[in-house]
Amino acid sequence: MPPKTHAHQAASRLKVALQTKLGQVKGDETLVQSLYQALRLVETFLNKAEGTEGELEALKSQVTRCIANKGSSRKAASARTSFRPAKAATPPRSAEKVKAVSKTQDIMFAAQKPEIDFTLPPIAIERKGRTHMNEYGKMAILADQRYENERLQKKKNQRAQQMMNKAELEFQMQENQLRRLEEIKAKDVERKEMMIKVETWEKEAEEQFNVHLQKVAKSKVERKQQVDAKLAQVKAEHEYDRAEDQRILQAANVETVELEKVKAAIAERNRNELKATHHENLSKVQEKMRLKEQEKMHDILIWKQGEQLALQREQQRVAAREKITARAAKMAVMSDSDNVKAREAEKRRKIDERIEREQANFNRLEDEKVAIKQAKKKQMKVEMLTSLDVQLKEKEKVLHKELQEKHELAQTLEEKFRDYEQKEAVLKALKKHRNYKHGTEVYTQIIDDAQKRYVESQDHMPDVEKKLQRTFLEALPT
């Protein structure tokens, strides 16, 4: 039910604030007891007070003093004996305000009087609330006495009425008996006519039933034939579907095996490629060293071949000169003439010049061939080394890219794991906060319910009810 007045609304807001404060307090038992006492004051105000401004001011003063004193026994005892508003508050002067303050003091006294542990079982709280007799109890005793007198008088009237009803009932029973005999005779005649109709209907029904049985038997045979045909068709389809499913399953198994083989082959190929790359890099390094050594040996061999070729050329030139000299000497011996000698000398000179020219031309051609071979070898070597360098660089790029991708993947996984841990921590904190909040709300609700049960079990008569029942209450014995 919503609050009745502005004061009740303010008291409701004060109750919510106290409950929130109670949920935030941890470890301070004195402050917790003070907050419980303040909540009892507010709850009593909401249940009993009329909702005037004077009552609200007195309630605020009491709650403030209760929290400020933190529930000390000496202050609590003082609060039980004096419920006047705080000294700083302006004392009410009108009769209505005086009456409101007096009523508020009575309410505060009723709230402060019991010291109840509201965590006890509900039946214990209700039993404590029913310890004293109140206006309702007195009214109940008087009502019980009046009810007993009315019950006895009503019982006498009922007995007299029963005697009258009995005589009237006996007369009605006699009339009903005569009427029932006439009805029995009429029903007997009607029953005989009905039996004749029933026999006729049974014969017709039996004939119709026999015809129906024949139709049912015929339709049953036809239905059985249809069912057998349908079952045969379904069985054939089922066998086909089962064979097809078996084939698909076998194909799927084969595909699975093939897929596993392909995966294994890919993994093996990757391992072999890594090993091959490693061996290839090692082989390339060794090949470079071997080529350098081979080039060095080749240069030495070429130098030796050049030395040997020069020596051979020199030997050939010396042999040719000796041969010419021997031929000239032989001719000189054969001819004694000076002209012959001169011609022979000129001839030898020309032969020597021709030999030198041919030797120089031969040496030049040989040198050019050697230079061309060396240039080709050097070019082939440069091209091979360049190709090896390009391949090595490409392999290094691929390896670097793979390492970079693995590093990025590791960073991504690490970031996702950190995000997951952060989300888990946030979820745990939220869950812990929700559990704590829920526990506080449940505990507060338990205390509120216990307070309501305690107040309701006291069964005090509201002031409005007292005013309405004033005449009756004044007549009650004290």
Image: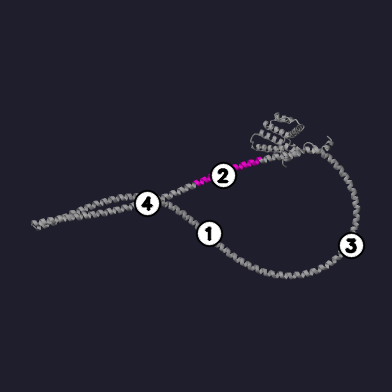
Q: Which mark is residue 423?
A: 2
Considering only vertical position in the picture, is 9 above or below 289?
above
Q: Which residue is mark 3?
A: 182
Give the distance between the C-alpha atoms of the residues marked 3 and 2, in whole angstroms. Answer: 93 Å
Looking at the rendered structure, the secondary structure element under dot 4 is helix
Q: Which residues are magenta?
A: 411-440
Q: Which mark is residue 474?
A: none
Instruction: Name the residue at 70% across, 70% down.
Output: 218
Instruction: Name the residue at 48% across, 55% down.
Output: 264
Give the distance between the C-alpha atoms of the residues marked 4 and 2, in whole angstroms. Answer: 52 Å
CB contact under 8 Å: marks 4 and 3? no
Name which of mark 3 and mark 2 comes first in the sequence. Answer: 3
Q: Is residue 197 magenta?
A: no
Q: In this orientation, which residue lies closer to the viewer: 352 or 249?
A: 352
Give the amino acid type for the residue marked by disc 1 in the picture.
Asn
Give the amino acid type for the residue marked by disc 3 in the picture.
Glu
Give the distance between the C-alpha atoms of the residues marked 2 and 1, in whole angstroms. Answer: 41 Å
Q: Which residue is mark 1?
A: 253
Q: Which mark is residue 388?
A: 4
Give the distance between the C-alpha atoms of the residues marked 1 and 4, in whole angstroms. Answer: 46 Å
Q: Position of residue 431 (x, y in %)?
A: 61, 43
Looking at the rendered structure, the secondary structure element under dot 2 is helix
Give the amino acid type for the residue marked by disc 4 in the picture.
Leu
